[in-house]
Image: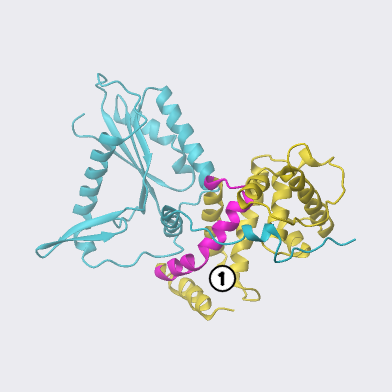
Chain colours: A cyan, B yellow
Amino acid sequence: MPLEPPGPEDPARRLAGGVAPPPALKWRVLHTLRARGLVTAPVRPGRAVTRVLLYAAAALVLFAGGALVGGRRSVSVADTRPRFALFLYEDAAFRPTESHRALVAEYSAWADSLRRLNALVMGEELDHEDAAVLFRSGSAVTISPGDVESAAGNLTGLFIVRATSREEAFALARQCPHLKYGGRVALRRLTDS
Amino acid sequence: MSEEDRSLVEAVLARRDERAFVALYDRHASVMYGLALRLSGGDAPEAQTILHDAWVAAVERLASFEWRAELRTWLCAFVVNGARALAREAGRHPGPDIEDLPLGREDERLTGAIARVDLERAVAGLPPGYRHVFVLHDVEGYTHDEIATHLGITPGTSKSQLSRARGALRRALAPEGV
């Protein structure tokens, strides 16, 4: 006997309907689509001229923010080993084969392995929801929503590690799961090290 | 068929126009997210993963969309596939918990005054396989043939899972001691 179809008075039908997703999710989707070259961010006037300086400024802001509020600290303040920043970039070559949740778990496991080595200072995924670029245009400062344009792609993560040498920092960075999906990892030594 | 959807899709395909994509997202994301939430039993992080992956997969395959169905229906298929894949990935069995329930009035749809919150909680407690069929059929209005296509099962399996899902819900919603 066929099942009785649902009618309009069916309580189940009252569960139907849309639910607004969190605003941050739109930026996460946009970020992935940009990284895969499926959509292109709108051109922002004046950005090319100030790209290099803005990039450096953004990096400094990220450093400061990470140092002030970043979690996952595991190295004692007495540790005098040099600190290295690992910037994670994604461009069209970044092709994750796992879901975002699985990626987060994999990157977290890598961070845990750094912590066990007493090498992790901090590590965070960078949210795109509030991403913005500030630049002076004439006498005014313009705030442009979005990311700083970079030939390496979009900046999506930041880790700071302790290592006794540049070579040891390379060895740590080499294990970053970002590389196997086609992402790039830029390494910089912090100048106060 | 929505002409606005068509022009936005053409802009994304021709120029990778991000503004056009954002307009598409704003038009359809709420419906997709509502479906993802119901399929995941109200698990918001899982629903967000489903929605994210659904949009990425849909845009990657956008050129293959042939406009034989509504764009929203096509987009929701990615949500259904994502929910099913996540349940499979998590190793969740479609429903051994209620496999042996006796069948009685199971085939009848739910009726009467049921508080929405109670029903949501009961649906969330269903094993994923039964929940997916119940949500798609009784909540979203899909036919068994459509469900079979989306979930890769037979229409007969869809019917039997719906029957057991309704039975389990009826029991979960029954007053204590009844």
Q: Nearer the viewer, residue A134 or A16?
A: A16
Q: Which residues are magenta?
A: B19-45
* Image location of residue B87, percent across then percent down: 66, 45
Image quadrant holding the C terminus of chain B, namely top right
* Image location of residue A84, percent across then percent down: 29, 33
Q: Secondary structure at mark 1?
A: helix
Say whether residue B46 is magenta: no
Furthest-left residue in view?
A139
In this rendering, would A142 be left or right of B121?
A: left
- State whether residue A188 is above or below residue B10: above
Which residue position holds label 1?
B63
Please identify the dominant SS of the magenta region: helix
Residue positioned 25% across, 45% down in the render = A59
In this rendering, would B163 be left or right of A78?
A: right
Q: Nearer the viewer, residue B129 or A158?
A: B129
Q: Amino acid at mark 1?
A: Ala
> Which picture quadrant has residue A72?
top left
* Image location of residue B163, percent across then percent down: 81, 52
> Which picture quadrant has residue A133?
bottom left
Residue positioned 40% across, 25% down in the render = A115
* Image location of residue A6, percent across then percent down: 75, 63
Q: Chain of mark 1?
A: B
Say whether residue B33 is magenta: yes
> Which picture quadrant has residue A118?
top left
Q: Residues within 10 Å of mark 1 (few under 14, many from 20)?
A: few
Give the number of callouts: 1
